[in-house]
Image (tube, coloured by chain):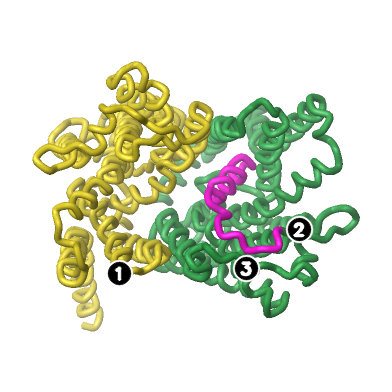
Chain colours: A green, B yellow
Amino acid sequence: MTTETTEADMQPDAVPKVTDEDPGPSRADRFSALAQQHGALVTLLMAMVVASLSFDTFLTGDNLENMALSSAFLAVVALGMTFVIVTGGIDLSVGSLFALGGVVAAWGSQYGSAVALLLPLAVCGLIGLVNGLLIARSGLAPFIVTLAAMLGARGILLAITDEGSRTYLVDKDSFLATLGQGSLLGIGVPVWITVTLFVLGAVVLRRTRFGQYVYAVGGNEDAAALMGAPVARTKIAVYAVSGLCAGLAGALNAAWLLSGVTILGSGMELEAIAAVVIGGTLLSGGFGFVSGSLVGVLLLKVIQNVINQIGSLDSAYQQVVSGAFLAVVVVAQTWLGRRRRVL
Amino acid sequence: MTELTLAQGRVDRDRLLRLLQEYGVYAGVAALLVFNFAFTDHFVSAENFRTQAVQVAPVLIVALGMALAIGTEGVDLSVGSVMALSTSLLSLYLGYGPWAAVLVPVAGGILIGLANGTLVAHLGVQPIVATLALMVAARGLALVLLPQLKDVRDPGMTALGSGDVLGVPYLVLIAVALALLVAFVVRRTTFGRQLLAIGDSRPAARLAGLPVRRVLIVVYACSGALAAVAGVLATARLTASDPTSLGTLMELSAITAVVVGGTPLSGGRVRIGGTVAGAVLIQLLTTTLVKHDLPPSWTQMAQAVVIVGAVYAARERGKR
């Protein structure tokens, strides 16, 4: 069924126009490809220029550092989400896993920093793994499985904190606290960790066999299976990666706040999805890149920051603007994506 | 020989799963009722049934719209925010009389629905992202219109929220009437047929000459309108407008009710009876756990298990 469609799509190419030389993609097509890949970056740069011209307080060290730090945690979550979305899936459980990771890390910090770091990874990675198993082996819809995981993880979180009334603290002098609050060369440690993870993520997605499988599964699952790609294993892996990223982000956030705050993370899955989509990754799968997601996160945070700077505007406008912006980006994406399909 | 027996076993399991998908939700409601009759104190009382029914009503109304969206192989994540927008609009227009206080919020819900529908039908955006964008925007809009909680002191609204006819609260009557209406539309009207055909296969529906775009837009507009009605009713019951928290996670409850009720996420089929039972099931589950002094965390975990179980039962059908 799907193979047929692909062949049909390729028909126009199979009968090329008889010309002396290959004209290559037209200028409009090249433009649409460029816009899709770098549109977010250009928008980000423009937003930053406008913001720094409009507000003296925008381009100050403090403000930039704050923005970088608050972006770091969402960025790590978005990194995992990118892998999932490139396979054509979605992970709604990340917000709950982020909160759970933070609480588990804070609880574990009483047994040492190693436990505090490994425990959230283990717990959230395991939940991600279960998501992946249900999706890949039982063929359930990613949307609904991760939705259930979102509720389940929030339930576990409430269960281990006496229904959310207990807040575990992180010792101020522990290694974990240094990881969250320390800085290196004037830049916060969480930001360094985030940048490292993004470089790692980009290499894995672009340069490894696993990365190629991720694209193949997202592009066309049946074709990937026929090609011999381990479809189920790839899918399980991306959800586990997403769980790990959310757990790590939660742990880092707890280290930064010096406590496991139970009410965090609601709505974070939506922010992460928005960032990934704004960054140029197609929700239908098969196309995307991690650097775009980083740009998407930064863009969301800049918008947020600008709206905060305009003191007279209610912070509620932030949501209106973000929502409208997301809608515009998605419409543009869909159009550009359609162009690429037709190509 | 072995293969034959295997195949036989598979057919039986398929049939079992299909039965579970068709009637599992009713069995679940019955089981919970029996359990509560037997083991829960103060469960069998008119007062308790009334409370339960009133609590189900808004969820059910939202779930009806969600069922339509899911029937077209879509989803509407904006419903919770539409409830919030509706409560804000209600507060603002309460001074212009009862009709304005009801109609303006509903018009607002329809507008959001139209925006969703346009994004999905005309611009080809995936429903989950389109409605996600409107979810964020509508909640923001609700907060811009009404920044904080406001009491709703209006005799008409109080009557709507807590009045009853022969002991049956208005809220329940409205919910039941809307459920019957939606069931009628899905089963007996051209629009219902078209909706299901689109859910089954959008390309096929288009080739058959159905007005795919128009139907999709109407579906999302209906979902928005129903969510707005739910917002008005919830406000009337609580006698307060709280745009910050009204309707949060409502999209999840609604999706759960629809999916548990046996409507496949893959579209092409809408089960309104199942959706009603699904909403009741979730409410009963929560009540059961609460009345037996189990903490709220258990409710969430139980809900997660129920969702996965329901989709698992539906999976054979959904995969095809």
Give the chain of mark 3.
A
Residue A183 visible from this viewpoint: yes
Q: Which residues are magenta?
A: A257-280
* Element class at badge 1: loop
Is residue A314 or residue A24 the one in the foreground? A314
In the image, residue A277 lies in the stretch drawn in magenta? yes
Answer with the quarter of the image where residue B104 lies. top left
The residue that disc 2 covers is: A190
Mark 3 residue type: Tyr
Question: Farthest residue toward the top?
Answer: B96
Question: Farthest residue toward the bottom?
Answer: B2
Mark 2 and mark 1 in contact? Answer it, CB < 8 Å.
no
Is residue B70 or residue A94 the one in the foreground? A94
Q: Which mark is residue B292?
A: 1
Residue A139 visible from this viewpoint: no
Answer with the quarter of the image where residue A250 lies. bottom right
Give the chain of mark 1.
B
Mark 1 and mark 3 in contact? Answer it, CB < 8 Å.
no
Measure how far apart labels 3 and 2 are at the Cα level. Answer: 20 Å
Eyeballing the image, is A131 above or below A325? Answer: below
The residue that disc 3 covers is: A168
Q: Residue B162: where, in percent of width, then height?
A: 23, 39
Looking at the rendered structure, the number of numbered marks drawn on it comes to 3
Mark 1 residue type: His
Question: Farthest residue toward the right?
Answer: A185
Q: Residues within 10 Å of mark 1 (few under 14, many from 20)?
A: few
Sequence-first disc among 3 and 2: 3
* Element class at badge 2: helix
Eyeballing the image, is A333 above or below B266? Answer: above
Q: Residue at x 68, y 61 (%)?
A: A204
Is residue B86 or residue B124 the one in the foreground? B86
